[in-house]
Amino acid sequence: MALLKGSCVKISDVTYEDIHGTSATEVAVKLDCSKTNPCTGITLEDVNLSYKDGRAEASCVNAVGRASGLEPSGCAL
């Protein structure tokens, strides 16, 4: 029986800044970090993305940091 292990990669201190445009997918921002090694120090600043003629979505899991001027909203960093 195989045991599932958490990620061995630790992502920290990453900034996404001044990003504008149209997403090819409905979920424009997806930060899906490891439960055992969550992403830390993530900054989303002035990110404005749309999807087709509507609103894009954002998803952040196990990510810690701050977001300002983020559209789509939905990432509680």
Image: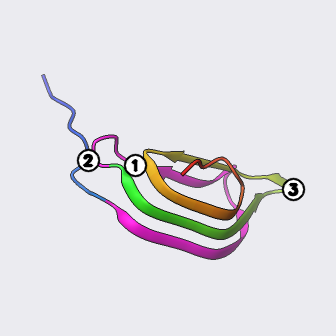
The numbered mark, 1 or 2, whose residue comes first in the sequence reads 2
Which residue is denoted by mark 2 in the rendering?
Answer: 7
Q: Which residues are magenta?
A: 11-37
Q: Residue furthest left?
A: 1
**Depth check, front residue: 59 or 69:** 69
The x, y position of residue 74, in whole percent, is 66, 47
Residue 22 lies in the magenta-colored region: yes
Q: Residues within 10 Å of mark 2 (few under 14, many from 20)?
A: few
Is 14 displayed left or right of 71 in the figure?
A: left
Q: Residue furthest top?
A: 1
- The label shown at residue 6 is none
Is 2 displayed left or right of 57 in the figure?
A: left
- Above or below, 20 against 41 in this view is below
Which residue is denoted by mark 3 in the rendering?
Answer: 53
What whole-number distance in Å separates the C-alpha atoms at marks 3 and 2? 36 Å
Which residue is denoted by mark 1 in the rendering?
Answer: 33
Is 73 displayed left or right of 63 in the figure?
A: right
Is mark 1 in CB contact (under 8 Å) with mark 2? yes
Q: Residues within 10 Å of mark 1 (few under 14, many from 20)?
A: some
The x, y position of residue 24, in whole percent, is 68, 59
- Tag 1 secondary structure: loop
- Tag 3 secondary structure: loop
**Depth check, front residue: 7 or 69:** 69
The numbered mark, 3 or 2, whose residue comes first in the sequence reads 2
- Tag 2 secondary structure: loop
